């Protein structure tokens, strides 16, 4: 067993572990639109830069895979992916020439994208390869959502709804008579599917789409896109720049006033209070206070309509606690404070490490994630792991703890991966 000092320094280099605020500047958004328009933000949506989509096709939607990558879909079956925060994209082979309107995933690598002429395509490997689904209905799909427990619901023209209960493999028509107008958006939150559409259409289901309740919001409203805030509120945007919000899963709605009158197509939120809405003529609105107030984001001159926006949900590893056990061994706790997942390769490939270093920058102990967290508890947001080192304190000496010391995991922020601390051994 390695032996060290009677003391180790407490000089935290952490940035408010697990306590992000709206002023955080490390969150990343991507926006896409007409003729291959693509933009990205690395400061929570306040300012934007032009990215390279690699296509001139109309891009309709973009999502994050929760591990630091974006996938977008559009006209002529276009599928593109970005592995650098939306700064550039590469093409992915598509099984269809039909227009793809939206896509969603279940956080376990399974994707479903929907589009024109009843088109449904599937991916079971994180969006790397896609297959054409055999289910075909006479409709145009506009949006899709999943409860991540096997149930997926797609909505479309003239009130059409389809449902899958086997992770998007087979589909059935569940349209019924609940709506006759176009259904443009659907979200799922805490057991409830919520749908919005033209003429103020709002529906919600508490039983995975078997029965739907109708909410009257206003017949002159036309909702287009929908998203969730970090507080669990539902937000819907649409024609004439409208923004509505619901804090009870779609049962009651309130108008949020802005100065914008441009048609809005989509809205997204990060985990710190930043929100972004995009729309016609390059409109990008930003809020840093969870949607209470909105302003125009700083951006390049954009004339093309924007149709999709997403927040890049990366993990964020941090050393949350350093202590001693009764034998004066150094015990380290690690947390995933980010809103994204750590990829399985962090365990299978073995390069991601926890290192404990001496005051002279000598490595005292180094373990990979397979040893640190064999149950993979760190994989999902909020997950944690505790590791008891072979290091035993004896004499005074400073130590430094680094998680993901080589920065191999795509994280929200790498600045909180290191901690120095001073501990006193009370062993007698």
Image (tube, rainbow, N blue to C red):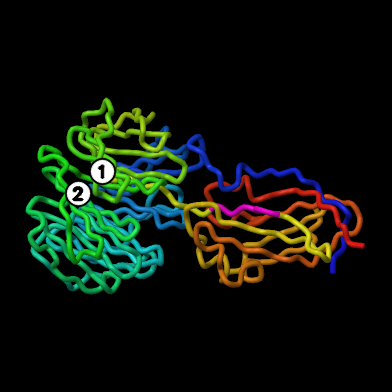
Q: Residue 348 appears in which quarter of the rendering?
A: bottom right
Q: In the image, is residue 88 above or below residue 145?
A: above
Q: Which residues are magenta?
A: 316-321
Q: Main secondary structure of the magenta part?
A: strand
- Residue pointed to by mark 1: 236
- Graded by Cα atoms within 10 Å as few (under 14), some (14 to 19) or many (20 or more), the crowding at tag 1 reads many
The residue under the point 60% across, 47% down is 17
Front in this rendered view, residue 408 or 400 = 400
Front in this rendered view, residue 84 or 199 = 199
Q: Is residue 264 left or right of residue 285?
A: left
Per the image, is 306 magenta?
no
Q: Earlier in the sequence, mark 1 or mark 2?
A: 2
Q: Which label belongs to residue 196?
A: 2
Q: In the image, is residue 321 above or below residue 173?
A: above
Q: Pointers 1 and 2 in contact (CB under 8 A)? A: yes
Q: Can residue 274 be seen in this snapshot?
A: yes
The residue under the point 34% across, 61% down is 105
The residue under the point 71% across, 49% down is 419
Per the image, is 317 magenta?
yes
Q: Is residue 274 left or right of residue 416?
A: left
SS under mark 2: strand
Residue 75 % position (x, y): 20, 53
């Amino acid at each position: 067993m390695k032996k060290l000092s009677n003391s180790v320094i407490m000089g935290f280099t952490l940035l408010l572990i697990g306590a992000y605020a709206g002023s955080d500047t490390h969150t990343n958004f991507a926006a896409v639109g007409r003729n291959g328009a693509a933009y990205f933000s690395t400061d929570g949506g306040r300012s934007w830069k032009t990215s390279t989509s690699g296509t001139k096709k109309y891009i309709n939607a973009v999502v994050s895979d929760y591990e630091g990558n974006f996938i977008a879909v559009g006209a002529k079956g276009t599928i593109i992916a970005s592995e650098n925060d939306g700064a550039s994209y590469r093409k992915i082979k598509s099984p269809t020439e039909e227009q793809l309107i939206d896509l969603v995933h279940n956080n376990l690598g399974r994707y479903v994208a929907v589009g024109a002429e009843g088109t449904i395509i599937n991916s079971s490997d994180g969006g790397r390869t896609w297959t054409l689904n055999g289910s075909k209905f006479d409709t145009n799909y506009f949006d899709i959502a999943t409860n991540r427990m096997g149930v997926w619901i797609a909505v479309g023209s003239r009130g059409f709804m389809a449902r899958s209960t086997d992770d998007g493999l087979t589909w059935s028509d569940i349209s019924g008579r609940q709506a006759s107008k176009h259904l443009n958006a659907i979200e799922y939150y805490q057991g409830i599917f919520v749908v919005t559409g033209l003429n103020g259409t709002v529906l919600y289901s508490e039983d995975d789409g078997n029965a739907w309740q109708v909410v009257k919001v206003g017949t002159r409203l036309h909702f287009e896109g929908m998203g969730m805030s970090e507080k669990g509120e539902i937000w819907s945007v649409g024609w004439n720049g409208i923004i509505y919000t619901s804090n009870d899963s779609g049962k009651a709605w309130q108008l949020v006033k802005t100065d914008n009158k441009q048609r809005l197509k989509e809205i997204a939120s990060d985990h710190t209070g930043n929100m972004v809405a995009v729309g016609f003529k390059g409109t990008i609105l930003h809020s840093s206070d969870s949607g209470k107030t909105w302003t125009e984001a700083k951006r390049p001159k954009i004339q093309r309509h924007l149709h999709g926006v997403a927040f890049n949900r990366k993990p964020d590893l941090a050393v949350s606690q350093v202590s001693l056990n009764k034998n004066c061994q150094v015990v380290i706790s690690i947390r995933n404070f980010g809103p994204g997942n750590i990829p399985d390769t962090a365990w299978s490939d073995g390069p991601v490490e926890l290192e404990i270093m001496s005051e002279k920058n000598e490595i005292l102990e180094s373990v990979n994630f397979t040893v640190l967290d064999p149950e993979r508890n760190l994989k999902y947001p909020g997950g944690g792991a505790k590791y008891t080192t072979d290091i035993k304190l004896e004499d005074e000496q400073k130590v430094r703890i680094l998680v993901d010391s080589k920065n191999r995991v795509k994280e929200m922020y790498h600045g909180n991966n290191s901690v120095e601390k001073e501990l006193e051994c009370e062993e007698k």
